[in-house]
Amino acid sequence: MTAKYALRFASLGYLALLLVAPLGFIFWRTFEHGVGPVWAAVTTPDALHALKVTLVLTAIAVPNNTIFGVLCALAIVRHRYPGSGIVNAVVDLPLALSPVVVGLALLLLYGRGGWLGGHGIVFALPGMVLATIFVSLPFVVREVVPVLREIGTEQEQAAATLGASALQTFRRVTWPAIRWATAYGVVLTTARALGEFGAVSVVSGRLAGQTESLTLYVQDRYQSFDTGAYAAAVVLALLAMATLLLMTRLRPKEGIQ
Amino acid sequence: MAANAEALSAAPAARRSLAPGLSIGLSTVYLSVIVLLPLAALGWKAHGWGAVSTPQATAALKLTLGLSLVVALVNAVAGTAIAWTLVRDRFAGQGLVNALVDLPFALPTIVAGLTLLALYGPKSPVGINAAFTRWGLLLALLFVTLPFVVRTVQPVLFELDRELEDAAASLGAGRFTTFLRIIFPSILPAVLSGAALAFARAVGEFGAVVLMSGNLPFKTEVVSVYVFGRLESGDSGGAAAASVVILLTSFGVLLAIGALRRWVTRHDR
Amino acid sequence: MISARGIVKRFGDFIALDDVSVDVPTGSLTALLGPSGSGKSTLLRVIAGLEQPDAGEVSLDGEDVTRRPPQSRGVGFVFQHYAAFKHLTVWDNVAFGLTIRRRPRREIEQRVSELLDLVQLTGLAKRYPAQLSGGQRQRMGLARALAVDPTVLLLDEPFGALDARVRKELRLWLRRLHDETHTTTVIVTHDQEEAMDVADRVVVMNGGRVEQTAPPRELYDHPANEFVMSFVGPVNRLGDTFIRPHDVELLLEPNGSTQETMVQRLVHLGFEVRVELVRDDGETLSAQLTREQVEALELQSGQIVYVRPTRQTVFSD
């Protein structure tokens, strides 16, 4: 029996020291002198612009990747065509690539001297959008694919025999089945888009007040020894916790007693 | 009757033939433009292979691979322990702990690095200063890779047939023997999958380590930071070359782990 | 000899075993028979030590083992869904109990070969359970349980997951095995045919209680109560009277105590025929006749016949 308590103590201790303590500490440190200074730090023009940039990036990336995600999942699972295995693997690539490498690849493609270069994509918002889309691409696909596999085609076939068109079948049979998996995927996509740092850093040129996302802003302020970094970090952490709450609610499977 | 049925199936089929084409076509184009094209440019423009064999580059590669393997191993153990605590144990606040495990997925990496630096860095209230050290790097990497093994092992542990443990008990096996000979082999594939994911993530991590590492060449410079450095110096070719090398190397490691996993599950075929 | 006395086991509000006492004579093959939820599997698991009773004692050969873990009770357990160790070969599965006891290799090799021969799985020793059929997996389960020379063999609905033909084969085979080894065996089943076929004694359970303990013949001929009678075989119930279908006599002419019924349906089951009858007041009855009897009476659907029981049972509460 003591083995059980030892294990519990060790696991919870690990989590406490690695996750909870640092996060708790930073909240404490940030709000040490009250909410006032934090609010002031977070509402400077540069900070607000950075927040706006982050939200714009997310607002573009998430819907795009959601629509793509559902279409791609349908293509992979329902219309097994030659190469669908490769597509499946390519979709997983953004998860395996370092964000810096992603940014570099985009820079080489769209930068000066690149194949599609010279159109004001890099060191500007479009490049950051592409980077954000790249890194947050897989999530909806990966959540929807297993659900599509599990529900099988019988219901859709039944709908077809009853005269439903492709669109009707999708709307009335397929979508209700994948709705929650898609929602979960959207939450993961959003979290990834909000938190993207490396790729966006490389591609943006980090011009404060112009091409800085909130994550870049945090680094910028930290390296300038400005405690505004903590304030911005706390904002991001709060967004993350809201995301975490949604993730917990929408999580497909339970893994605890 | 037969004619009716034919008419019924013909109409939807005609209308449905658009759908596969649409979803396949659109998604392929999207993937190619967003993912494949930039990667192709990366491969193409990677030159300066000489730059990749410099001592600094080699040191970065070795450090990255070494750290990532250690991280994978630590996660294999810690992740399994945490998964066990979440599945087999029962205590107040378990749901909260379960949700907490996902925090590294939700938290921006730069924020993760910042929070670790605050508690375990230069201004640490507990006197632990891991900044600019490999321990600090390890800490940051363990933070971001925490969920992987836990989440792959949890469902397997949950689905594990308790009867197997009853059978082992009836045959005389104590708790530890049962774990070693029955439970562990069953969860090993999941542990390997999770460890592979953790490894891949650790190899590429940037945001969490960039503040913590201080970019000291030969000491705390990991490949992602090295590549960034090459870029800042205008050597995009060299940066690309280093990227390709680390990509291929980690791909190789992942293939090896995949092969190991297949060997471990050979009895299922 | 297995002795369970005053066993009580609750799962939350549900009482699985309500003061159950059972004795299993050494060397016998006893069946625990009952519907789902009767507590028979729970009782078996309590005897094995896989469940702890809330009250009562379990003794094996006079020794109180109630607080002992399953590892040290010397029981062999066979599971309904085989509980095969998927990652081990058939050989390693069977050898498991001996391997963890660190028996010498020579001994393990001999014992495992012996057992594989006994259960007729010799050629499949190197295969994995995933490559075996259900029947083969269960034979492996049996061999595995026998490998450590248990004093008691417990089988929990061992043939429940198998199809009908395999079930009958294995049933026969289990009986023969028992006749050879004389290990004290307890088998849990909900199939009364299986229990009657295979066991020396049957313990009928219902709702966490023992209804009757007796050899199969006695159970059938002298059931202790209504539940046992209906569970152990088909029965006609007319008010308080219970009549077995083969105790229903059919006559073409009324004769004193006979009742008038109409033949609703004739169901030909090979050698036997089930005759479904209905009375004026709507009560139904079924009689079991041989083919010859049916032909002799020239029975047809819609025909009026006169019935009387050659034997009937009434239970006094």
Image (tube, rainbow, N blue to C red):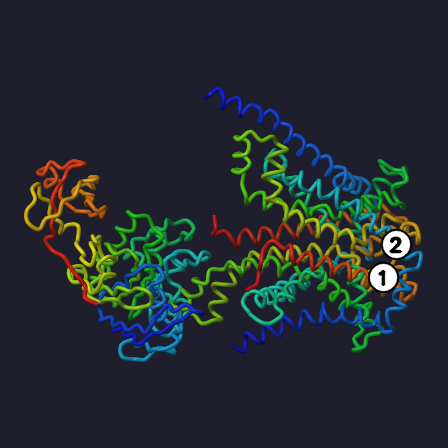
Secondary structure at badge 2 equals helix
Instruction: Look at the image and tell me in which quarter the N terminus of chain B lies.
Output: top left
User: In the depicted view, which residue is nearer to us: B146 or C285?
Assistant: C285
Type of amino acid under label 1: Ala
Left or right, residue C186 beside residue A80:
left
Mark 2 vs 1, N-terminal side = 2
Q: Foreground residue, C312 or C99? A: C312
The reply to whether residue C147 is in sight is: no
Q: Are marks 2 and 1 in contact (CB under 8 Å)?
A: yes
Whole-percent x, y for residue B146 in the image:
68, 62
Where in the figure is residue A99, as x and y percent of width and height? 78, 51
The three-letter amino acid code for the residue at tag 2 is Ala
Q: Is the residue marked by circle 1 packed among few (<14), some (14-19), or many (20+) residues within 10 Å?
A: many
The residue that disc 1 covers is: A232
Q: Quadrant of residue C125?
A: bottom left
Q: Is residue B251 above or below residue B127?
A: above
**What's the mark number on residue A216?**
none
Residue at 62%, 58% (x, y): give it.
B151
Give the image location of residue A240, x and y in percent: 75, 59
Q: CA distance from mark 2 to mark 1?
A: 10 Å
- Tag 1, which chain? A
Q: Is residue B154 in sight in this rendering?
A: yes
Residue drawn at 90 percent across, 68 percent down:
A37
Q: Residue furthest bottom?
A: C63
User: Which residue is at the front of the view, A74 or A198?
Assistant: A74
Tell me which corner region of the image, top left, top right, bottom left or bottom right, holds residue C42: bottom left
In percent of width and height, residue C101 lies at 40, 71
> For mark 2, what is the residue?
A50
